[in-house]
Image (spheres, rainbow, N blue to C red):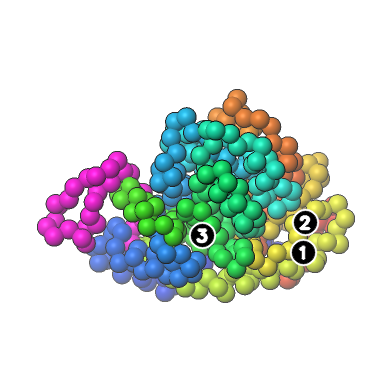
Amino acid sequence: MKIPFSKNQINNSDISIVKKILKSGWLTHGKYTKNFENEFKKFTKSKYAVAVSNCTAGLHLSCIAADFKKGDEVLVPAMTHVATAHAVSLTGAKPVFCDINLYNGSINIIDVKKKINKKTKGIIIVHMAGFPNQMRELQRVCKKNNLKMIEDCAHALGTYENKKHVGNFGISGVFSFYPTKQISIGEGGMVVTNDKKTYEIIKRRKAFGIDKDIKERKTPGIYDVKSLGLNYRMTDYQSAIGLTQIKRYQKELSARVKNAKYYCTKLSNIKWLKLPTFDEKASYFIFQIFMPKFKRLKVIKSFMKEKIGFSIHYANSLDNMSFYKSNSSKCENSNIYANENISLPVHSGINKKMINHIFRVLKKI
Ligand SMILES: Cc1ncc(COP(=O)(O)O)c(C=O)c1O
């Protein structure tokens, strides 16, 4: 039984819309981008949304909007995609790694408090695998220490904390539409914010710092540039497939939560596995299981033989990456997480029969 690790949600009617846009001649950001932003705002209940070329770009723009710069320190969990730390480094500021909690990957608040000093200007929170962090407590820490909070929501479309969609707790939240993500565009990202100033900065800086969108210009080609900027735009045909998917997303999300619940029940029968506690507020980008490293090698071998799709998020903690390690202290839990995790598919293409099969393969080991 072949079990795919991810499944994109693009259907034939989405393909027809893309064809129509390609033939229309209007290829870069346009009305579909606007509609995608509007629909995304509705889903997350944020005041503003800006579509960008990918989540890394959105994180970089958020760090610019937060005014992180050389001499500043920004706290980042050690267990995340390197994009989270790179976004900070690109501004000249230094990412300082904090440890995480086992086994839901949230940032360890005790370690956060330990690492705050006079240079600390902000923090990036990562909702690992779609699990929410303790946002109220983190907001209190940020307020007390005057830190700007950015949320890396690359895994977290549909994740809530205290009935609020993640991405709405700090100055901005950034989502990813990389192919394995809950909504897949190929490449793409979305920044949400409730702060007008942050919105204005991100909107302008994503398009060269130009003061007017094409549609806002009275005469073609006439505009001014008021700040430095990049080209981090999303094309209109990419926006179109994001738009159709966000409209259908509630169904996909429910399937993920249902599958995760079944995984929790079924796999709890295997004593050598560690599982995250089921959380219905999580959006389950992946379903992670944990085991000693020697056991993981056996599991990987069996999954490959049985054609069961899997991945590892992440196999190396950032404090161990060559680019960052000379400047970092060790983050013990992040290293355990890196050595012990396997990510299983949990998307709507997975059913009970497949989960039972995964259970049997694991049980044999
Ligand atoms: C936690 C996290 N942050 C950021 C990114 C970067 O996203 P993108 O590929 O859209 O730039 C990823 C990518 O998978 C991620 O997992």
Which residue was labeled with disc 3?
A: 168
* Foreground: disc 3 or disc 2: 3
| Residues at discs 1 and 3 in contact (Cβ within 8 Å) | no
Mark 2 nearby-residue class (10 Å; few <14, some 14–19, many ≥20): many
Which residue was labeled with disc 2?
A: 275
Q: Secondary structure at mark 1?
A: helix
Question: Relative to the observer, which residue lies in front, 154 or 120?
Answer: 120
| Residues at discs 1 and 2 in contact (Cβ within 8 Å) | yes
Instruction: Note whether ligand 1 is within 8 Å of mark 3.
Output: no
* Amino acid at circle 1: Cys
The x and y percentages for residue 365 are 85, 52
Q: CA distance from mark 3 to mark 2?
A: 28 Å
Q: Which mark is residue 264?
A: 1
* Amino acid at circle 2: Leu
The quarter of the picture where residue 322 lies is: top right
Residue positioned 47% across, 73% down in the render? 247
Q: Which residues are magenta?
A: 209-236
The quarter of the picture where residue 120 lies is: top right
Q: Judge whether residue 24 can be spotted in this image.
A: yes
The x and y percentages for residue 298 are 79, 46
**Image-based side of 291 in relation to 219, left or right:** right
